[in-house]
């Protein structure tokens, strides 16, 4: 934030509250061009915002006032500058739903405490979409009043040019364009006289005093109910387990029936379509911010989006034919070029393998030898119980068993410390390979879970390539 803007934001605070600012600090950059700061004194803490886009600010300010009139949990606006480029907001703290999810998952897995927070969010969502959406002033929406044909084609072409092209995925331009037309026409046939939040994901939900609050809805417009639900449940780095997604989907439908009648099969079909376009839109954004603008943070989200596509495609059954689009998506999830792009700034590869001691410790394909082998056999074994025998450490029920009925949490704590020590040293010294092996009796439950947890931890915290192998699966 330039000094001139900073001083104007400070003056706005001091004029409104008739108090001096004692502390000024910039907040981390967001995925947009908006800038945020925190202004504090002994009486209060307030968020200052600067955005040169007046039309976007007008939408945000109008929506916020409307939501607060409806009793919805959004930040209070204290003051707005005369040029509509600076404004002061209620400080909702620093804890987003994504932050809470990441911290809690590290120690508890995707536990009931996380799920309960998502239920709180989904209890409010229909109020935003339907109650507030009924008499919303859509004339202030920016850049479009509705998630219409033009909006959809922007998203689809964003995906095509900023992701497919950079990922070197071959496609027939005209055939793909034809499929985009068919796909968008199908989505437009969904009921759409509701408020569409547009970026309804875990980083835009704040947690304060155990309540949920909502931010960053300035891109909202008229649209279908399914889009925001898809945005939340298929939020890339949140990586919600499929079983939990299904539970939350059912919970939302139950809440929705308090407002409108619901045809579940029709709603579900449209939902799958909106999941697909939302994933494609997100990948376009990752491509633009990551590949084009060279912002490393956004590249880290690509593997999660690919994983979501891999989960969605086998279940995708839409009443329209889109052969080129489906072919392109299958090529994308198997693209070697894309894997290389994601690894371009990561010179250290950490190979994590789960295995059965009955079949011996895995060999190190790098040829370096060394690394770690951790023995999980001292932990309570889910494989001894009939209900878990045919499952693996990737299944939610096994994960919950290990988190609640074993000492896995305490086992992994020193493991992470040891591996992190080596990674930091290897990065400084320019080493290229580190192996970490987890063994148990059958290589199905404990070792698989431990390997998955360490892989997720390293991907989220270190600039390394993580190769995860479950040898016995």
Image (tube, helix red, strand yellow):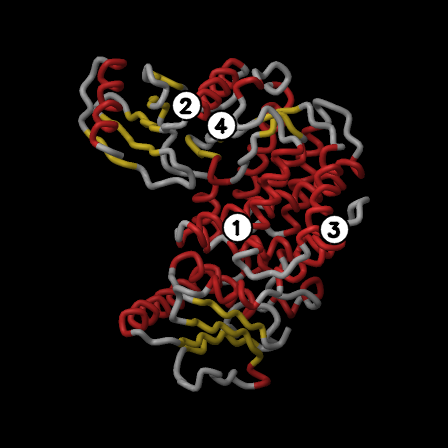
The residue where tag 2 is placed is 54
Judging depth in this view, the residue of 463 and 5 nearest the camera is: 5
User: In the current view of this chain or complex, which residue is farthest to the front?
Assistant: 174
Question: Cα distance, mark 1 to mark 2?
Answer: 26 Å
* Cβ atoms at labels 2 and 3 below 8 Å apart: no
Please tell me the numbered disc located at residue 162: 1
Residue pointed to by mark 3: 316
Residue mark closest to the camera, 1 vs 4: 1
Q: Kindly report which numbered mark, 4 or 2, lies closer to the viewer in this rendering.
A: 2
Estimate the spatial distance between the alpha carbons at disc 4 and disc 3, rounded to whole Å: 31 Å
Mark 2 lies on a secondary structure that is helix
State which quadrant residue 436 falls in.
bottom left
**Given this view, does label 2 or label 3 mark the residue nearer the observer?**
2
Which is more N-terminal, label 3 or label 2?
2
Q: Quadrant of the N terminus?
A: top left
Residue identified by numbered label 4: 218
As displayed, is residue 78 above or below residue 379? above
Residue at figure coordinates x 23%, y 14% from the top left: 15
Please give left or right for residue 78 compared with residue 62 in the image.
left
Q: Position of residue 370 (x, y in %)?
A: 39, 83
Residue 211 shows up from this direction:
no
Out of 249 and 78, give the one closest to the viewer.
78
Q: How many marks?
A: 4
Label 3 CA crowd tier, 10 Å (few <14, some 14–19, many 20+): some
């Amino acid at each position: 934030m330039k000094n001139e803007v900073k001083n104007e934001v400070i003056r706005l605070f001091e004029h409104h509250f008739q108090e001096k600012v004692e502390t000024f600090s910039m907040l981390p950059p967001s995925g947009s061009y908006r800038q945020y700061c925190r202004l504090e004194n002994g009486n209060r803490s307030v968020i200052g915002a600067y955005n040169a886009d007046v039309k976007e600010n007008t939408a945000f300010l109008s929506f916020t006032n409307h939501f607060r009139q409806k009793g919805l949990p959004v930040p209070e606006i204290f003051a707005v500058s005369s040029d509509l480029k600076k404004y002061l907001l209620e400080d909702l703290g620093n804890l987003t739903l994504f932050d809470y999810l990441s911290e809690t998952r590290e120690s508890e897995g995707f536990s009931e405490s996380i799920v309960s927070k998502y239920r709180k969010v989904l209890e409010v969502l229909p109020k935003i979409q339907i109650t507030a959406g009924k008499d919303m002033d859509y004339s202030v929406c920016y850049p479009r009043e509705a998630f219409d044909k033009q909006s959809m084609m922007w998203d689809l072409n964003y995906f095509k040019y900023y992701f497919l092209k950079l990922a070197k995925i071959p496609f027939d331009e005209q055939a793909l364009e034809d499929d985009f037309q068919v796909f968008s026409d199908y989505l437009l046939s969904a009921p759409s006289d509701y408020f569409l939040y547009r970026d309804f994901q875990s980083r835009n939900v704040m947690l304060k005093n155990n309540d949920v609050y909502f931010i960053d809805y300035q891109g909202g417009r008229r649209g279908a109910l399914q889009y925001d639900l898809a945005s939340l449940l298929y939020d890339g780095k949140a990586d919600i387990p499929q079983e939990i997604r299904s539970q939350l989907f059912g919970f939302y439908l139950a809440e929705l029936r308090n407002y409108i009648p619901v045809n579940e099969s029709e709603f579900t079909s449209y939902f799958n379509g909106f999941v697909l376009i939302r994933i494609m839109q997100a990948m376009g954004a990752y491509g633009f911010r990551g590949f084009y603008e060279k912002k490393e943070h956004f590249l880290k989200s690509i593997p999660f989006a690919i994983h979501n596509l891999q989960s969605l495609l086998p279940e995708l059954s839409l009443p329209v034919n889109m052969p080129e689009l489906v072919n392109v998506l299958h090529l994308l999830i198997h693209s070697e070029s894309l894997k290389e792009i994601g690894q371009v700034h990561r010179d250290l590869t950490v190979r994590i393998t789960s295995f059965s001691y009955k079949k011996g410790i895995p060999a190190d394909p790098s040829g370096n030898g060394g690394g770690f082998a951790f023995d999980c056999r001292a932990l309570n074994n889910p494989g001894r119980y009939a209900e878990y025998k045919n499952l693996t450490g990737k299944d939610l029920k096994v994960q919950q068993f290990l988190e609640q009925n074993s000492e896995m949490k305490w086992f992994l704590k020193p493991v992470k410390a040891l591996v992190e020590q080596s990674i930091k040293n290897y990065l400084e010294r320019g080493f290229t390979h580190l192996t970490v092996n987890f063994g148990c009796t059958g290589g199905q439950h404990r070792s698989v879970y431990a390997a998955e947890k360490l892989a997720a931890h390293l991907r989220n915290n270190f600039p390394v390539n993580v190769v995860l192998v479950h040898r016995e699966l």
